Amino acid sequence: MTSNTTTGWTGGEKTFGDFAPGLAHYTDKVLFDQVWERDGLGKRDRSLITVAALTALGKTDQLRFHLGFAQENGVTLEELKEAILQLAFYTGWPNGMAAMGVLKESNRGEQD
């Protein structure tokens, strides 16, 4: 891991900077500048793991961002559909249905 990596990520700052500067700092500087940049896994794999965790926990608000981020990181729409189907059997059908609904909504108008 490069300890002084700067990705330029400012999502935490934009969302919570004035209201919760500590959360903004850890989101931008630790989570995205350090954790997401570690050498042990590629961003594609980190995205799949994150989507799986958020689906399992039913965290659809965060899933909205991470499904798009996964696609930016090289996970295809078809792979996300298959991952969510697989997850539905292990995390509960309602979680799978909710995650698939978020994926469908976020990809509205796009063709497979």
Image: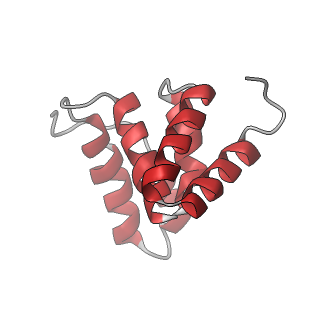
Q: Quadrant of residue 93?
A: bottom right
Residue drawn at the location 47% of the way across and 47% of the way down:
87
- Which residue is at a point 40% across and 47% down the rendered structure image? 50
Rendering colour mode: secondary structure
Compared across the picture, whether 2 is left or right of 59 comes to left
Side of 45 where 82 appears, left or right? right
Total numbered badges shown on the rendered structure: 0
The extreme bottom residue here reads 19
Which residue occupies 28% across, 35% down? 37
Work out whether 29 lies above or below 41: below
Q: Position of residue 19 (x, y in %)?
A: 49, 76
Where residue 99 appears, x then y in whole percent? 60, 53
Q: Is residue 46 above or below residue 92?
A: above
Return the residue found at the far front: 89
Q: Is residue 10 visible?
A: no
Foreground of the two, 51 or 43: 51
Task: Give the residue drawn at x 42%, y 53%.
Answer: 90
Q: Who is closer to the viewer here, 82 or 17? A: 82
Quarter location, residue 53: bottom left
The C terminus sits in image quarter: top right
In the rendered image, which quarter contains the N terminus?
Answer: top left
Pinpoint residue 109: horizontal percent, then vertical percent.
Answer: 84, 33
Depth check: 77 or 7 in front? 77
On the picture, is 107 further left or further right than 9? right
Tell me: 63 left or right of 110: left
